[in-house]
Amino acid sequence: MRILWRPFGFSRRLLKVENCRITESESLIPLTWTSLIQRLSRAPRIFLLGQRKRFSTMPETETNQRDSELFSPPSDVRGMTKLDRTAFKKTVTIPVLKARKEIVSKLMRSLKRAALQRPGIKRVIEDPEDEESRLIMLDPYKMFTDDSFEKAELSILRQLNVNPQISNYNLELTYENFKSEEILRAVLPEGQDVTSGFSRVGHIAHLNLRDHQLPFKHLIGQVMIDKNPGITSAVNKINIIDNTYRNFQMEVLSGEENMTTKVRENNYTYEFDFSKVYWNPRLSTEHSRITELLKPGDVLFDVFAGVGPFAIPVAKKNCTVFANDLNPESHKWLLHNCKLNKVDQKVKVFNLDGKDFLQGPVREELMQQLGPLSKERKHSVHIVMNLPAKAIEFLSAFKSLLDGQPCSHELLPTVHCYSFSKDANPAKDVQRRAGAVLGISLEACSSVHLVRNVAPNKEMLCITFQIPAAILYKNQTLNLGFLDLLQRIMKNHLLNARGQMNPFQKKKHKLLQSLN
């Protein structure tokens, strides 16, 4: 037997190897890591007391697998389709340190590195053999013997008169000790994607399961309820949102059937029947972004208002709001939520098709807002069109919508129109499609905001622009062609190398504004 000694960082450990013969010639030259590993792999017993990641004959993947298996559910739950919580019992061996109960609090502050960090498992437990002592659970991946303590930790142990000897404790794990992701990874077929995330809508967990997860859908639903306080119902979407009312069919996987729920978003409360209306909690930031664009006194037309996530916050800013939705259920809950948030006197609610809303109430109000007295008004007009699958098609309703003399450029309505795109350049794609409906290029006079990634290679965006007077007003077809020509010129020549307009460009820009 030969003892190999080598320093590992600042800590020196002994590596004991039995039945590993090294020839005389090999002992005279430095051993390479490769040759050493090859010889150690043939040794019957290897004891590694140094830093575990610096040197080991065990492949890294095997080490990671072993580590993850320690806190993984039993292997025999694989393929379970009906949840049996009792099948998740498992006993693991955890290193523990014994200490007097009166010093445990002080000791724990110095053992943050060494203590077990596992949600749901107490780090300090009673000593079954000594009621005056406690057992401190240690990290089984870091703590093996008393040599595993760092110098600072050993110093504290000596100060508090604590024996650094580590003992083993058999800890029983149950279903309650495992995370939802760990449970589903153990149950679902090995190598398959695991669903541990969902959209929370009040007391409802909204999942979107894939085909390979469907045989386990009821188990998945129950696990989501068990592991997420406040969740009492789990549902799965079983079709895409492609109907007139923007809701989708859903299946209750587990829990209560009640789909009437209450949510809080940006300090506002909304109540609705989730099975009958559209609600997306991932749009909270976008609702807030649009709300911040409006100032007190401004006017908002919400063409596809849903249950009010744009209309209500804007109304709270002392704006005038016209909110519309074709879905009778959305219309009902929109009225309810306006009263619930005490803005029912500031929101006029409609139950119309989007085009009828634009060509009816919106047109009538714009004729007043942008009429002869409009120069005295200082507020802005915004139109939100949040129907990403089809909103761009509704832009055609703005063509020749108004009669009379065009208002000044500053008073023209600002449109925020949402759309999906799978194009390699989604911003250009949305500008192109919106411009095609209006019959004018929007590249030089619009901005595009990325709202969120909906799916791989599918983005949700918002294009914002002021409706040109040549589009909005009747009898402006002559100006429309000239306006399009000027916009193309602006696109190519508007900015010089320093990003500033020269005198000639300023004249063109001023001319363009006068036409709008």
Image: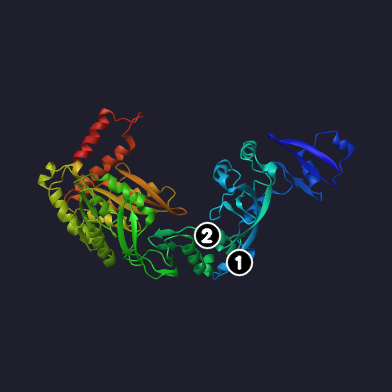
Looking at the rendered structure, the kind of residue marked 2 is Ser
Q: Is residue 77 visible?
A: yes
Q: Label 1: few (<14), some or many (≥20) within 10 Å? A: some
Residue at x-position 58% and y-position 62%: 174
The image quarter in which residue 411 lies: top left
User: Would residue 221 be found to the left or right of residue 451 on screen?
Assistant: right
Q: Secondary structure at mark 2?
A: helix
- Position of 331 relative to 413 (above/below): below
Report the residue that reaches farthest toward the left: 372
Where residue 167 appears, as percent x and y from the top left, is: 68, 50
Q: Quadrant of the N terminus?
A: top right
Residue occupied by mark 2: 180
- Position of 80 relative to 137 (above/below): below
Tell me which numbered mark, 1 or 2, is placed earlier along the sequence: 1
Residue occupied by mark 1: 77
Q: Quadrant of the C terminus?
A: top left
Looking at the rendered structure, the kind of residue marked 1 is Val
Where residue 357 appears, as percent x and y from the top left, is: 21, 59
User: Would residue 291 be found to the left or right of residue 46 on screen?
Assistant: left
Label 1 vs label 2: CA separation? 14 Å
Q: How is the image coloured?
A: rainbow
Where residue 383 appears, as percent x and y from the top left, is: 25, 51
The image quarter in which residue 393 lies: bottom left
Q: Nearer the viewer, residue 155 or 93?
A: 155
User: Would residue 126 be found to the left or right of residue 55 on screen?
Assistant: left
User: Would residue 311 be found to the left or right of residue 108 on screen?
Assistant: left
Residue at x-position 28% and y-position 48%: 291
Q: Nearer the viewer, residue 382 or 215?
A: 215
